[in-house]
Structure formats: C-alpha cells, structure tokens
Image (cartoon, rainbow, N blue to C red):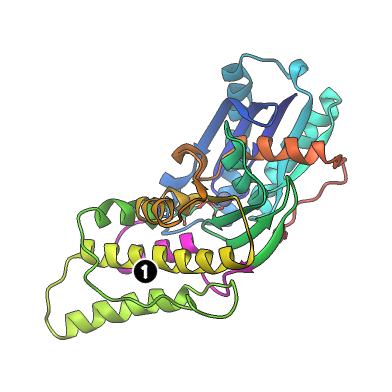
Amino acid sequence: MLILSFESSCDETSVSVTRDGKEVLSNEVLSQIDIFKEYGGVVPEISSREHVKGITLVYKKALEDAGVTIDDIDYIAVTEGPGLIGSLLTGINAAKTVALNENKPLVGVNHLSGHIYAARINHEIKFPCLAVVISGGHTELVVMNEDYDFNKIGSTTDDAVGEVFDKVARILGLPYPGGPLIDKIAKEGKPIYDLPRPMAHSNDYNFSFSGLKSAVSKLIADLEKDGIEYKKEDIAMSFETAVADTLYQKIKKALKEYKVKEIVVVGGSAANSKIRETLSTSFKNIEVTFPQLKYCGDNAAMIGISAYYKIKKGEIDDMSLKASSRLDL
Ligand code: KG4
Ligand code: ZN
C-alpha cells in the first residue's frame, strides 16, 4: 500500500511517500526555521503563507524522489490537528485537492499519533507499549495495548518539554529553536547546579516544566547579583539533566502500574542527546526506542506510517475532514 502524506501543522511543510506502514520512499521537509529565528518563535500568519508558497514544490519533489506517479498512490493522508489552524488548512486543502482530482481516499491523522508512529519506521513495536511524546507543543505519556489504541495517562499541566527548551534558550540568549543549541552547548558543560524536578514524585503521571524555567531564570539572576561567573554550558547541562531525570522518574512510576514491553520516546525533543542517553540506559529488560533523528521533528513520513495503521483499523475520512487546532489522541 502506497500512501502520499502531508504535514503542515507548524513550521515545516512536508510531503512523503511511504509503503506498507514501515518503509519511507521519500520525505521532503521544507523548514521555516530560518525565517522564524529573527522573530524568536513561529508567527502563525507568516507560517501559513510560507506553507502555501512551498507545498506544490514539496509535493512534486516527494513523488519524484519516491520514483512514483500520483497514479501509483493508494491513499492520501494529512495532519488534521493539533497545530496552527492556518498552517493545518494549507496541508488539508492540498490533500483534499489531490484526493478529489485523482479520486483517492482521504485519511486525517492526529499529529501526535504521527510522532508516535515515527518509532515504527523500519521497526516493529512490541505491545503493550508506553509512548513518551516530547515535542514543542506537547508532553504526553500514552499507553498502547495494540496499534492505534491510545490511552493517555498523563500530560504537562503547563509548558511542553520542547517549549521549555526554547524558553530556557531565550534566557541564555540563544536563538529559536533553542532545543538543538542547548543540546550542543550542554556537551561542553557539567551538571553542577541543582535544579528542581517539578512533580517528579507527584501521585500521577502529569508534568510541570514552567517551574524549572523559572528556577533557571532565578539561578542566573542570583549568580549575576552575587557577581559569580558562570558558564552557559554548565547551566544548559544542569537543565537538561533535570528534564531527563524528571522524565525518567515519571516513566519509572508508570512502569510499576503498566506492564509494557517497550518504551518509545518521540517528538522534537526526543532528538536530545542527554534525554536519549538517560532513557536508553536506565531501564533494564525493557526495550527503549527512539526514532532516527530525522524523524523526531515534524515530517510527513510519520503521518504516512500512522495513516497506514488507521486505515488497517478501518478508519477512513472524507471531504468533510476539518482542521482542528486542538485535537486529542
Ligand atoms: O515535534 P516538533 O518538531 O514540533 C512540535 O510538534 O512541536 O518539536 C519541536 C521542538 C522545539 O521546541 C525544539 O526546540 C525541540 O523540539 N527540539 C529539541 C531538540 N531538537 C528539537 N529539544 C531538545 N533537544 C534537541 N536536540
Ligand atoms: Zn510535532
């Protein structure tokens, strides 16, 4: 089964061709990051316009790279939400146009399920599985007993993991998006500052990261007030260590209640070196999987893989498919 998929929920315009829910034949990603560096974050109106500009080219390139024509495609998949409404609409309109013109069935995909299914690219997931979604907009713990069965057991009560990376980067004077830069400089630093692990031991599976961001801000203010020299690298490493440890504590707690066979850690911040190192070495007798780095951030391949399992469950959409800025799994 060949699926042509579209992703445009935030600042990446992406189109992909995937085969049988595991193989990526092409995955074109046009990023708007360079545009938003000077704004310090995504500007929704500019993002939608950029998607409109780029989507036709990306679509053509994805078919070309895969070595297929539109006639070979069996289904058209598209991210329906959550995300920026104007950005989502560009992908949905493009997908609907192709589906209607070429008479192909249309499948809407939840962006978060897309992130989870990035872990299924060239990899079989063992069920039951615990999915840890850590992206710019979301932080969720999801138990899956089988394919396309999502049971959310916890989420962030304020900032998402990627969001707090971006905010701490701003405090450190680093440009948007801060995650990759904090990751880079932390490699030269040591975790010498003791930062809080908010809610790490609370009696639920929820997270709260905004207190950690405030703690970093206060730490820097205190050091500067006392005239103590500090290295951004050490703050970055101390911060990453606190995030990784908080995730570890919550996952450890979840493993006591949910007997899962595999943990998949997905989303933009699943690219983080410290998080990858901590989570891949902390759990004995349980497989911990991260998508390849290129499938951690937003991309259409993960949407195509996720669509395959939705189709297998017999769930298909039609032209009434709508963009939903807020959409639960
Ligand atoms: O999943 P994603 O591409 O978009 C959303 O669905 O939100 O995630 C983007 C987020 C950004 O906040 C970015 O700073 C973060 O992922 N990120 C990272 C790293 N690379 C990207 N966070 C920590 N370490 C990284 N290496
Ligand atoms: Zn995403």
Q: Is residue 167 visible?
A: no
Left/right placement of residue 80 relative to residue 207 reads right
Whole-percent x, y for residue 63 in the image: 64, 20
Q: Is residue 246 visible?
A: yes
Q: Is residue 279 above or below residue 252?
A: above
Along the line of sight, which residue is nearer the eye, 82 or 309? Answer: 309
Whole-percent x, y for residue 216 in the image: 32, 75
Q: Amino acid at mark 1?
A: Ala
Magenta region: 154-177
Near mark 1 (Cα within 10 A), the count class, few <14, some 14-19 or many ≥20, is: many
Whole-percent x, y for residue 22 in the image: 63, 30
Q: Look at 60% across and 47% down and name the residue there.
A: 115
Q: Look at 49% across and 78% down and name the residue there.
A: 201
Q: Quadrant of the N terminus?
A: top right
Classify residue 328 by image quadrant. Answer: bottom right
Q: Is residue 173 magenta?
A: yes
Q: Is residue 278 magenta?
A: no
Residue on which the image places disc 1:
242
Q: Look at 82% across and 23% down and name the residue there.
A: 102
Whole-percent x, y for residue 54 in the image: 58, 34
